[in-house]
Amino acid sequence: MVKKKEIEKTLEEEIVVEPITTEKIFEGPIIPGIKSKMAISDLPGVGEKIAEKIKEAGFFDMMSIAAASPKELSNAAEIGDATAVKIINAAREELDIGYETADKVMERRKKVLRITTGSKNLDALLGGGVETGATTEFHGGFGSSKTQIAHQLAVNVQLPPEKGGLGGRALFIDTEATFRPERIVQMAKAAGLDPEVALSNVVVGRAYNSDHQFILAEKAGDLIRNHNVKLVIVDSVTAQFRTDFVGRGTLAERQQKLNRHLHTLQRLADVYNVVIYMTNQVMSRPDVMFGDPTAPIGGHIMGHFSTYRIYVRRSKGGIRIAKLIDSPNLPEGEAVFLITGDGLSDPPEKKK
Ligand code: ADP
Ligand code: MG
């Protein structure tokens, strides 16, 4: 017989180990008309078998089907182009995709939430922290702190709203093998979180090549829906694409693939109102004589898909300087922050 004390002990252990945020708080997509009760298998010409194939190919909901091209869908489900067109049209009708007045957009903007970076300066630059429903790209050279920020956000997303978090989990797509649980532990302690719980709230996917990275992102929808994920990190978003396509003389192919990947990420932000934090390297541009001779990788495509773009660079003594390059609603500006063992913070104010 198990003693009462022991039961209590196991219960206690379970409570500690059980992540604090497992209760599902997925309030449904925030895009209008996207709340579809229709199952994929209910679409005309789609049976259980084809529905399965469609889902396996990453089209996990009505929206992704509606946004697919006939070729994409026909390849994925091994059906004819004409059938694919029919299915896509039916999904579009079901979703009632169309225009709306700006007051409705404003209403939805109120659902936008933010995660604190841990630095007041950096939060201010970003309009209060990194935003849900948007993609935020930090680019910069090695050691500029892109990965540190990723870890910090993975911890801070778990904080309750009054402390600048979203009470949710983080998904960490690690393409450079630089994810470090030890940093999560250090930062969690500093933020007043139980390190064990904090670790269990970070779901890590190590991407070994660009295809793998691609699939990890396509699978993220399931995790977001079922496990209260509020933050998706891709660190780095471009590195694998860069190495995988080196010397293949297939720049166009690379850009196309990156384009689809970024599209997937953008869709996750839109549909699930989560934060997408992605990092990007810079390459040197020998042609630039004056000003900053570095440019983010990924060209126009990266620029097109990043709602917020921040350039971060290293200064002396743990200090970093972030510059907001592009934003739909915020002025350009700079912020100075600090990286320490505890994570991100602000530099101490200089005494006058
Ligand atoms: P990248 O932009 O290349 O991703 P990182 O985010 O990995 O750069 O930043 C690495 C830098 O972060 C290190 O060079 C160091 O300055 C700082 N850093 C990493 N870990 C710690 C730590 N435990 N304590 C203080 N600073 C750290
Ligand atoms: Mg890094």
Image (tube, rainbow, N blue to C red):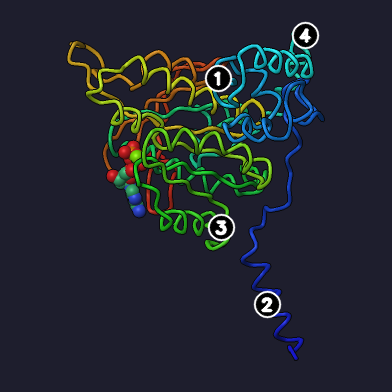
Inter-mark Cα distance, 2 to 1: 50 Å
| Residue type indicated by callout 4 | Thr
Q: Position of residue 76 (x, y in %)?
A: 56, 26
User: Circle 4: is it few (<14), some (14-19), or many (20+) Cα within 10 Å?
Assistant: few
The answer to whether residue 216 shows anywhere in this view is yes
Is 291 displayed left or right of 28 in the figure?
left
Inter-mark Cα distance, 3 to 1: 36 Å
User: Circle 1: is it few (<14), some (14-19), or many (20+) Cα within 10 Å?
Assistant: some
Query: What residue is shown with label 1?
Result: 72
- Of the residues under marks 3 and 1, which one precedes in the sequence? 1
| Residue type indicated by callout 1 | Glu
| Residue type indicated by callout 3 | Ser
Is 296 displayed left or right of 62 in the figure?
left
Q: Nearer the viewer, mark 2 or mark 1?
A: 1
Q: Which mark is residue 10?
A: 2
| Label pair 3/1, CB-CB below 8 angstroms | no
Label 2 SS: helix
Query: What residue is shown with label 4?
Result: 101
The answer to whether residue 318 shows anywhere in this view is no
Q: Which mark is residue 124?
A: none
Inter-mark Cα distance, 1 to 4: 32 Å
- Of the residues under marks 1 and 4, which one precedes in the sequence? 1
| Residue type indicated by callout 2 | Thr
Inter-mark Cα distance, 3 to 2: 18 Å
- Of the residues under marks 4 and 3, which one precedes in the sequence? 4
- Of the residues under marks 2 and 1, which one precedes in the sequence? 2
